[in-house]
Image (spheres, rainbow, N blue to C red):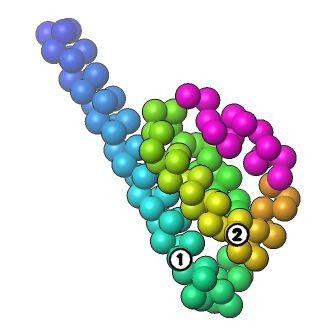
Amino acid sequence: NDSDQQSAYEDIIRLYHTRVRELFAAQVKTLSFLTYLLRGFTDQMRPYEEIMAQNVISLMRNCPRDAVSTRKELLVATRHILATDFRRGFFRHVDALLDERILVGTA
C-alpha cells in the first residue's frame, strides 16, 4: 500500500534526523570534555590546537538548525577554548567566527 510505504519512509527520515542530532550532540559533549583537558594537559593537547579549531568551526557550520541547546553548549565550549592559549588555533578562522550564519546558525 502506498500510504503505508509513505508512512514508513517518513518514520525512517524522522529517525535519521533524530540520530544525526544525537550524534552531533555527542560530538559537542566530547568537545566540552576536551576543553577540560586543555587546562590539565596543555602540553599533550598542544599538537591538536589547529585541528581542534578547524573542527569547532566545522561543528558550528554543520549544527542542525533545530539543535538550539547543542549550539549553546558548542558556544560555551568555544568560549572556554578561547579563554586559553589555544585561541591561537582560531586566528586563521576569524572570518568564519565573525560570520553570524556560522556563529549563531540560521535558525
Of helix, strand and loop, which mostly describes the magenta segment? helix
Residue type, mark 2 in image:
Ala
Instruction: Judge from the rendering whether residue 69 lies leftward or rightward of residue 75; answer left or right.
Output: left
Where does the magenta region start and end?
Answer: 94-107
Q: Give the tally of numbered discs.
A: 2
Residue under the point 71% across and 65% down? 82
For the question of whether residue 49 can be seen, the reply is no
| CA–CA distance in space, label 2 to label 1 | 12 Å
Mark 2 lies on residue: 83
Question: Badge 1: few (under 14), some or many (20 or more) residues near its Cα, within 10 Å?
Answer: some
Q: In the picture, which quadrant includes the C terminus?
A: top right
34 in relation to 70, above or below:
below
Q: Is residue 100 magenta?
A: yes
Q: Secondary structure at mark 2?
A: loop
Residue 78, image x and y in percent? 63, 59
- In the figure, residue 67 lies in which quadrant? top left
- In the figure, residue 87 lies in which quadrant? bottom right
| Labels 2 and 1: the sequence-earlier one | 1
Q: In the picture, which quadrant includes the N terminus?
A: top left
Residue under the point 50% across and 53% down? 73
Residue 66, image x and y in percent? 46, 33
Q: Is residue 13 magenta?
A: no
Question: Badge 2: few (under 14), some or many (20 or more) residues near its Cα, within 10 Å?
Answer: few
**Mark 2 vs mark 1: in front:** 2
Q: Secondary structure at mark 1?
A: helix
Residue type, mark 1 in image:
Tyr
Q: Nearer the viewer, residue 42 or 7?
A: 42
Mark 1 lies on residue: 36
